[in-house]
Image (spheres, rainbow, N blue to C red):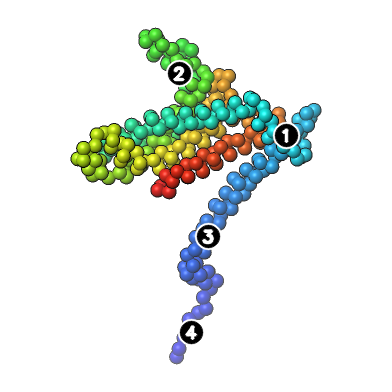
Amino acid sequence: MTTTAPAAGPVRRLAGTLHRRPRLQLSLLLSAPLAWLALAYLGSLTVLFLSAFWTTDSFTSNVVKIWNTDNFTALFTTDVYRQVALRSIGVALAVTALCVLIAFPIAFYTARIANPKWRPLLVVAILTPLWASYLVKAYAWRLILAQGGLLDWTLKPLGLEGPGYGLTATVLVLTYLWLPYMILPIHAGLEQIPAGLLDASADLGARTGRTFRSVVLPMILPSIAAGSVFTFSLSLGDYIAVQIVGGKTQLIGNLIYSNITLDLPLAAALGTVPVVVTVLYLLAVRRTGVLSSL
């Protein structure tokens, strides 16, 4: 007597289809996060860009959906907006450069010099500042940089004084806040360099500087580029640290924040500036080709 196999249920048929078609399986797995990205992130950016073409009633401060380019015209023709935008880009570049200069020796020690059994603890120590509250760290720096504060007290025997509140203080605080985002990629890049490669460079007569320029730097450029994306974009859009230690300094984030309740379309137009600058920065980094080896 022969028996027939039971018909496959819908779940089994679906499982078999997904097993035979791995691309379909991957598409279904990515559909939810991609849909969230499209709706929540790209959707909000679209609304931001569209609202920048609206206007505000000068009497009631209500948003009027009348399409015009007055807000963008003001961005390009008003001196203060151009100066603030250029200042914000300069601060982001300065923070990124300082992060690279500070992060490399720290990452080199943690990745190449420190005892291997201590390296995980050192990485945890680097990450520890990220666990603290943003405001706690910013206000701690406000106390350090205050007139008669810790920095002034330390420099006074040398006949010097701290920078106080202002643009320099803003760059210092932002560098401290985003430094771990630069250390970790460089640490990972240095760990991947074979030790024999550095020994071979020394055996061929290369000095430390030549080894760094010809061997180490080309291999960690992708790591520096990856870290710079974080430090640049985070510094460009920051406004809280500027309010706490910036004194009278104004960056693009401050202008956006101050105009949200007064002139929402103008704030939206200002908000497109860091988005466009960040996209251009990403395209410039991508054009160098360093990201292709990540």
Question: Rounded to the nearest whole Å, what is the CA distance between mark 2 and mark 4?
Answer: 81 Å
Question: Rounded to the nearest whole Å, what is the CA distance between mark 3 and mark 4?
Answer: 35 Å
Eye-nearest disc, 1 or 4: 1
Looking at the image, can residue 68 be seen?
yes
Looking at the image, can residue 133 be seen?
no
Task: Please state which amino acid type lies under the numbered disc 4.
Answer: Thr
| Residue under numbered circle 1 | 70
Give the label on residue 61, or none.
Answer: none
Task: Please state which amino acid type lies under the numbered disc 2.
Answer: Ile
Give the label on residue 27, or none.
Answer: 3
Task: Please state which amino acid type lies under the numbered disc 3.
Answer: Ser
Mark 1 surroundings within 10 Å by alpha-carbon count, few (fewer than 14), some (14 through 19), many (20 or more)? some
Eye-nearest disc, 2 or 1: 1
| Residue under numbered circle 2 | 144
Where does the image place residue 35, in percent across and percent down from the top left? Answer: 58, 53
Task: Please report contact status of discs 3 and 2: CB closer than 8 Å, yes or no.
Answer: no
Q: Quadrant of residue 87?
A: top right
Q: Quadrant of residue 102?
A: top left
Element carrying mark 1: helix
Q: Outermost residue, bottom direction?
A: 1
Element carrying mark 4: loop
Question: Rounded to the nearest whole Å, what is the CA distance between mark 2 and mark 1?
Answer: 43 Å
Element carrying mark 3: helix
